[in-house]
Structures are given as structure tokens and as C-alpha cells.
Image (tube, helix red, strand yellow):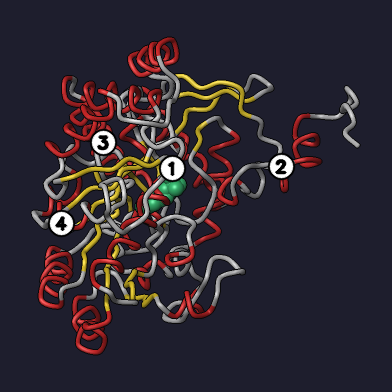
């Protein structure tokens, strides 16, 4: 029987009584932060229920590129709320405009479908690739995350003894489903060529984060992405760029425009709606036209909330602002400051550290050279990585204290924020070393 909570029970205790672990995602189960109750967010800041203020570099794993609760996005969502919630039939003018905008911006996107999450977008990308090719295997890379569904739920952050082996991130996945995914090494073109030589006729899709930001930041060698393109083309496999993080955040045309490599399908999400639940899948017309949104087409595609008017309004307002205001210029400049100014500070403390990233994304690894591959990341000092961030959080500067997680700058962060970030990092690392 439901009971009203006694007034003396704290919010985190109430949460744990009714929500497993007290949070709504395995990724929010962060040691040391079990009692964090979020109350409000604005710009580069969030506040907890006790009124404590944090400068936010975690950014909800990446969506609020404009900053939290951006006034233009909030106004567009409020306006949508006044006019239209959801009818679940037909299409809205906003959905058309959003698809047109993405198709105009992103080189691979001839046709576009909307989902509510990035996971749904990658799920549908792999399903349509299997349908189009009639093949079984999917290739993913150690260190890349593509959402929670079975085909890709493996080998993201793996312990050293699990690298190079099957490493599911969940139980409950059928072994035959796990066996239908090959896990290769990122930035290893020879490994890709070898896998295609052995299995090319059975590879339906290669899915990749063109910059694996789910382990911080591994910058891709140009040859690596080109090899993926060449091998997929040669063997008739579908190349999927998962640009859920890189898309829009690094450039309006995604990483594919930066790299000059055009995949067959692209998935996006996160920053395209600045914090509202969105995913998008786009790509070659012949593949996209296999989805059942088209009469008689065979690949089932649905979702009650796909193209929700409030989300579409948020995305349109976000993309408009990204096109009209110097958002990228601002976040790239702040990111460059972090990557230029933090290394000498850390060097002066005598700690081996590299500060890397791209544009608005930065990460400090505690190791002595820039990582190119997941195996290189095994040299990162996990204790330092998590330890200094816990101290930062105590000082109200929020970089997520979980190993290998990246940090994000937004349009709302200022030079003063970056000054404080650098000062706080210095103090936190110094204390961690003591
Ligand atoms: N792809 C990438 C690269 C991601 O980083 C994520 C989420 O972090 C996803 C897909 C899944 O997106 P969502 O959490 O919206 O389902």
C-alpha cells in the first residue's frame, strides 16, 4: 500500500525508497553524489535542492550547447505548449522545417526521421542496414557508446582485462545477439581491413562515433575514417556515423563535414534541441525510404512522441540561434583557452597530464601522452581523474567525477568561468597529490 512519506525523510531517501538507486539512469549513479537533488538550472549554472550552486561542465552529457534554459529555446517551447501538444497523425510544419534544416546542414542527410532519443536513432540505423543488406553482422569500436539497445551494449569503458574480448555492459542480452556484433579497435585501419577481409560479405553496418567522446576524446586519424568509408563501399556495407555528440556541437554539418567523409546514415540527438528529448536519423534516400513511414515500405518505424511539437520547437530555436549567433566561435575560443592554459598549470605541479578535446569539449587525462586509441587510455590514472573532480564538485565546479567522462562548454560560459575552472583545477589536483 502506498504511504505518504514522513516529513522527516529526506528527498534522496524518498527517492531511494521508490526509484531503484534513487536516480533514473545507470549513468546518474555516481559514487559520492547519491544525495544530489537538482532544483534549477540556468545558463552555465545549476543549483541543488539545498541552494548550492555549481558551474556546470557536465552539461547533462552534452545537450545544452547554448546553456541551460536558453531564453529563446524556452520561449519557443512555451509557445508550442500554448498551441499544440501532440496529435500523432499527419505531420506539422515544424517537423518539415526541421527535416529540411538538417538535410541542408548535414552532408549525408538526404532524408530525415525524428525519434525521441539517440538510442532509438542508432537502433533504427542498424535495423535498416540489416534490412537493406540482408546481412547479420554489425561492427562497433571499443570505447564508442551508441545507446542502450542490445546490438551495441558492449565494450564502452572496459577494464584492461576485458579489452579485446566481448564485454557487455548489461546482463540479459542473448548471446547470439552479442555474437552478431564485432568489436574492433578505433584508429586501427588495418584491423578494419582485416575484419572486412574475413567477414565482409556478412557485415551489414559499421557504426562509429567519429570522435569517441564517450571515453573523453580520441581524435580520429583521417586515414581511419577514410578506411571505414572505403571498406564499406567496397563490400556494400552501410556506414553509420553516430553524431549524437559531435553533430551540431562541433559544427553545424557534423564531424562528417569537418572530416570530409560522408557516411550512408547519420544519427544525431542531444545538442540539436539543447536539452529536450530528441534523436534524428538521416541519410541516403534509398535506405531511408525503406522505413514504414513511407507507404508499403518494409522496415517498421514508429514512436508515439517522434517529432513532438515542443521538441521540434526547441530544435528549430536552437538551430536558428546556432546559425545566427557566434555560438561556435565563443565555445571554441573558451575550449582553446582551457586546452592552452591548463597544461602548463598541471606541468608546474609535476603531474603527468594531457588536456585534449575539440571545440567545446575538453578532458584532462592523467597520463604522459595524447591518447590515439582506447588501449592508450588504459594509462590514465583513474584515481587522479575521479579524485580531482570530486574535489572540484566540492568547490562548486562540476566536472562529472566518473572515469573518462568529457566536459562541455556552452554559449553561457564566460571567460571568468574558465579562469575559475583553471584555478579550481589547480587547487584540486594539488590537494589530490598531497
Ligand atoms: N550515441 C552517442 C554517441 C551517445 O553519446 C549517446 C548518449 O550518450 C547515444 C547515442 C544515446 O542517446 P540517448 O541517451 O539519447 O538515447
Alpha carbon distance from label 2 to label 3: 37 Å
Q: Quadrant of the N terminus?
A: top right
Q: Is mark 4 within 8 Å of ligand 1?
A: no
Ranked by sequence position, the earlier of labels 2 and 1 is 2
Q: Are marks 2 and 3 in contact (CB under 8 Å)?
A: no
**In front: mark 4 or mark 2?**
4
What residue sits 61% from the left and 22% below the top? 39
Secondary structure under tag 3 reads helix
Q: Nearer the viewer, mark 2 or mark 1?
A: 1
Residue marked by disc 2: 22
Question: What SS does tag 4 mark?
Answer: helix
Could you classify mark 4 by the number of other residues whose Cα lies within 10 Å: few (under 14), some (14-19), or many (20 or more)? Answer: few
**Tag 4–tag 2 contact (CB < 8 Å):** no
Circle 2 — which element? helix
Residue beneath the point at 19% across and 20% down: 325
Separation of disc 2 and disc 1 at Cα? 27 Å
Q: Is residue 25 above or below residue 132?
A: above
Bin the neighbour count of mark 3 within 10 Å (Cα to Cα): few under 14, some 14-19, many 20 and up. Answer: some
Q: How many marks?
A: 4
Which secondary structure, mark 1? loop
- Cα–Cα gap, marks 4 and 2: 45 Å
- Image disc number at residue 303: 1
Which residue occupies 34% across, 69% down?
140
The image quarter in which residue 216 lies: bottom left
- Picture disc at residue 286: 4
Q: Which residue is mark 3?
A: 337
Amino acid at each position: 500500500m502506498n504511504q505518504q512519506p514522513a516529513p522527516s525523510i529526506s528527498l534522496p531517501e524518498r527517492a531511494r525508497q521508490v526509484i531503484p538507486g534513487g536516480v533514473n539512469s545507470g549513468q546518474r549513479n555516481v559514487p559520492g553524489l547519491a544525495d544530489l537533488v537538482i532544483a534549477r538550472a540556468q545558463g552555465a549554472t545549476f543549483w541543488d535542492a539545498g541552494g548550492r550552486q555549481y558551474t556546470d561542465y557536465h552539461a547533462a552529457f552534452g545537450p545544452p550547447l547554448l546553456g541551460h534554459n536558453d531564453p529563446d529555446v524556452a520561449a519557443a517551447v512555451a509557445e508550442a505548449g500554448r498551441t499544440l501538444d501532440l496529435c500523432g497523425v499527419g505531420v506539422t510544419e515544424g517537423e518539415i522545417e526541421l527535416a529540411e534544416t538538417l538535410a541542408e546542414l548535414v552532408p549525408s542527410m538526404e532524408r530525415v526521421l525524428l525519434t525521441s532519443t539517440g538510442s532509438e536513432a542508432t537502433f533504427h540505423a542498424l535495423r535498416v542496414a540489416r534490412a537493406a543488406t540482408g546481412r547479420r553482422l554489425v561492427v562497433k569500436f571499443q570505447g564508442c557508446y551508441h545507446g542502450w539497445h542490445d546490438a551495441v551494449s558492449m565494450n564502452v569503458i572496459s577494464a584492461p582485462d576485458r579489452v579485446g574480448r566481448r564485454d557487455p555492459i548489461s546482463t540479459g542480452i542473448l548471446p547470439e545477439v552479442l555474437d552478431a556484433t564485432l568489436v574492433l579497435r578505433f584508429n586501427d585501419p588495418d584491423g578494419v581491413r582485416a575484419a572486412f577481409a574475413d567477414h565482409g560479405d556478412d557485415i551489414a553496418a559499421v557504426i562509429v562515433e567519429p570522435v569517441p567522446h564517450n571515453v573523453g576524446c580520441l581524435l580520429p586519424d583521417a586515414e581511419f575514417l577514410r578506411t571505414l568509408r572505403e571498406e564499406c563501399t567496397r563490400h556494400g556495407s552501410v556506414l553509420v556515423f553516430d553524431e549524437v555528440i559531435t553533430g551540431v556541437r562541433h559544427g553545424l554539418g557534423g564531424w562528417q563535414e569537418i572530416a570530409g567523409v560522408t557516411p550512408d546514415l547519420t544519427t544525431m540527438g542531444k545538442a540539436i534541441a539543447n536539452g529536450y528529448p530528441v534523436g534524428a536519423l538521416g541519410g541516403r534516400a534509398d535506405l531511408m525510404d525503406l522505413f514504414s513511414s513511407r507507404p508499403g515500405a518494409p522496415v517498421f518505424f514508429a514512436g508515439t512522441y517522434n517529432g513532438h511539437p515542443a521538441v521540434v520547437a526547441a530544435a528549430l530555436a536552437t538551430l536558428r540561434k546556432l546559425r545566427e549567433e557566434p555560438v561556435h566561435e565563443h565555445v571554441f575560443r573558451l575550449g582553446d583557452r582551457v586546452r592552452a592554459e591548463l597544461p602548463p598549470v598541471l606541468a608546474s605541479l609535476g603531474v603527468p597530464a594531457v588536456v585534449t578535446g575539440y571545440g567545446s569539449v575538453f578532458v584532462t587525462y592523467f597520463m604522459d601522452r595524447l591518447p590515439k586509441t582506447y588501449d592508450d587510455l588504459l594509462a590514465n590514472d583513474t584515481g587522479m581523474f575521479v579524485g580531482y573532480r570530486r574535489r572540484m564538485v566540492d568547490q562548486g565546479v562540476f566536472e562529472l567525477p566518473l572515469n573518462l567522462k568529457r566536459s562541455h562548454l556552452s554559449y553561457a560560459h564566460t571567460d571568468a568561468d574558465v579562469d575559475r575552472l583553471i584555478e579550481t583545477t589547480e587547487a584540486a589536483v594539488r590537494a589530490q597529490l598531497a
